[in-house]
Amino acid sequence: MPHAQRQLLLVDPHSLFRRTVALVARQMQIAEVHECSSHEAAQRLLEHQTMDGLLLDIGQGLDALALLQSVRAGALRCSPGTPVALTAEACDVSTAQLYKELGARRIMLKPFKVKTALEVIQDLAGPETPAKSAGAGLTPPSAAPATASGAHNGADGASGG
């Protein structure tokens, strides 16, 4: 009997990115990726449905932070230890540290390749191991913001190749 695919939630305002990542992850049988365009929609979904992992866009406000705090507090249907990775246009060291303290595994600075996102989704969908404890593998980015050309990709530690 085949095992059930892991259920992941991708929260990002860009529909093309969400659709592409979700479609490829499903086709490659990495995970069943559910999509939300906003943190508010994700919060409503997580009040009624459990997820095995979350990939959240940090966005401009504190919505991603509030959502992650709700998860960690056990206020939603998913486990407080649900693995979480983040995407961001830019992220300073203090923001990265704040998310690390909440157990974020990784921050990927945009733009990055779909392949990089799929690798992160595969990590989120994989079994939890002691090496993947809260904050493991999260490397704070440099204080310099990500450039529009994508040359700065230090927060995710992957070449995105």
Image (cartoon, rainbow, N blue to C red):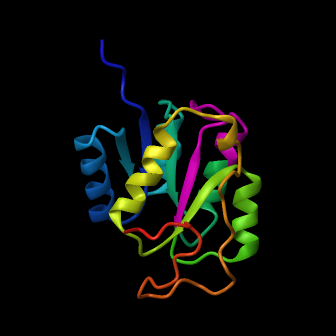
* Left or right of residue 131, residue 77 in this image: left
* Left or right of residue 46, residue 37 in this image: left
Above or below for 82 versus 13: above
Image quadrant assignment for residue 149 = bottom left
* Left or right of residue 93, residue 29 in this image: left
**Residue 37 visible in this rendered orientation of the protein:** no
Location of the N terminus (image quadrant): top left
Q: Residue at x 68, y 42 (%)?
A: 131
Determine if the magenta segment contains residue 78: yes
Q: Residue at x 30, y 62 (%)?
A: 15
Q: Position of residue 56 (x, y in %)?
A: 51, 56
The stretch in magenta equals 69-87
**Residue 7 visible in this rendered orientation of the protein:** yes
Image quadrant assignment for residue 29 = top left
61 and 139: which is toward the camera: 139
Q: Residue at x 71, y 45 (%)?
A: 134
